[in-house]
Image (spheres, rainbow, N blue to C red):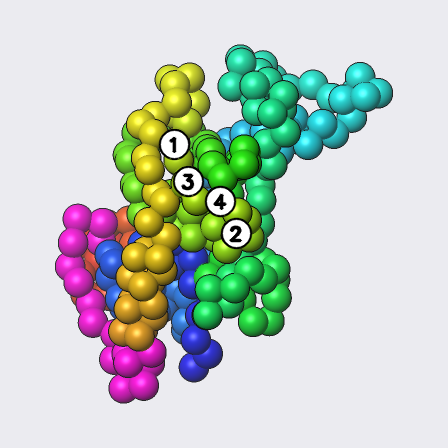
């Protein structure tokens, strides 16, 4: 078995159920999940923000917000003015050094929806089109990546942007990147131990009904 590239998505799945994470990201033996209407809309919104922040077609007057998204201009415009990056795909090696998202040595990677650097301070924004659920762990992982690629940064402030409400969420100080990276490495050691013995514990929990592992005895949809 090949050790997986770490990401917030993997780490979150591992925390939820190690067996689920194993099947999804290590064995990779599950059928491809169909994209839901909500997922499709979320992807379209991310693509629209990426195009707007990168100024694609702007000089020629060709770019327009897709139907129903023009309201997002009030959020995007200030970020454009300060030169914020969009869909910043970055990674780090196991020793914490910066590396490309697709580099063969990548240990942890992620896509930061938007980041603006001002001297020693970085402001991170994560677009959310679904229900409100503050997940500071995701923002902390983004901060680890940002600090590695911008070593001059000493402080990282990160927020979710709840687009259904047109509101910027709580500002989280996620500057404690050394502690977060140590936590991630601890989880990685557990993953390696499970891989070494070939055993990944199952954990019955409230998300079992949405789990893609249909052959697990804890999945209420098993056999249906």
For the point 30% across and 42% down, the residue is 136
Q: Nearer the viewer, mark 3 or mark 1?
A: 3
Check disc 2 and report its element: helix, strand or loop.
loop
The Cα–Cα distance between marks 1 and 4, rounded to whole angstroms, is 17 Å
Q: Position of residue 180 (x, y in %)?
A: 32, 56
The Cα–Cα distance between marks 3 and 4, rounded to whole angstroms, is 7 Å
Residue 42: assigned label = none
Residue 174, picture quadrant: top left
Q: Nearer the viewer, mark 3 or mark 4?
A: 4
In this view, which residue lies farthest toward the bottom?
197
- Are the residues tagged 3 and 4 within 8 Å (C-beta)? yes
- Are the residues tagged 2 and 4 within 8 Å (C-beta)? yes
- Residue identifier under label 1: 159
The Cα–Cα distance between marks 2 and 1, rounded to whole angstroms, is 21 Å
Q: Nearer the viewer, mark 3 or mark 2?
A: 2
Vertical order, 118 against 167 (above or below):
below
Q: Is residue 145 found inside the magenta-colored segment of the image? A: no
Q: Position of residue 183 (x, y in %)?
A: 29, 61
| Residue closest to the eye, 35 or 89 | 89
The stretch in magenta equals 192-208
Sooner in the amino-acid sequence: mark 1 or mark 4: 4
Check disc 3 and report its element: helix, strand or loop.
strand
- Residue identifier under label 4: 153
The residue carrying pointer 4 sits among few (fewer than 14), some (14 to 19) or many (20 or more) residues within 10 Å by Cα, namely some
Q: Position of residue 47 (x, y in %)?
A: 60, 34
């Amino acid at each position: 078995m090949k050790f997986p590239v770490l990401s917030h998505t993997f780490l979150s799945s591992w925390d939820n159920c190690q067996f689920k994470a194993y099947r999804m990201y290590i064995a990779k033996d599950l059928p491809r999940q169909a994209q839901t209407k909500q997922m499709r809309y979320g992807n379209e919104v991310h693509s629209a923000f990426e195009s707007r922040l990168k100024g694609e077609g702007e000089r020629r007057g060709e770019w327009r917000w897709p139907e129903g998204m023009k309201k997002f201009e009030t959020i995007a415009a200030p970020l454009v003015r300060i030169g914020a990056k969009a869909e910043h795909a970055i990674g780090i090696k196991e020793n914490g050094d910066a590396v490309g998202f697709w580099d063969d040595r990548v240990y942890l990677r992620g896509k930061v929806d938007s980041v603006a650097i001002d001297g020693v301070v970085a402001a991170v924004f994560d677009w959310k089109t679904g229900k409100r659920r503050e997940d500071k762990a995701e923002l902390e992982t983004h901060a680890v990546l940002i600090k590695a690629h911008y070593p001059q940064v000493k402080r990282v402030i990160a927020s979710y942007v709840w687009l259904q409400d047109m509101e910027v969420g709580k500002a989280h100080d996620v500057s404690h990147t050394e502690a977060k990276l140590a936590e991630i490495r601890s989880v990685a050691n557990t993953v390696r131990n499970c891989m070494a013995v070939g055993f990944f514990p199952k954990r019955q929990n409230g998300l079992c009904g949405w789990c893609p592992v249909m052959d697990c005895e804890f999945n209420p949809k098993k056999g249906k």
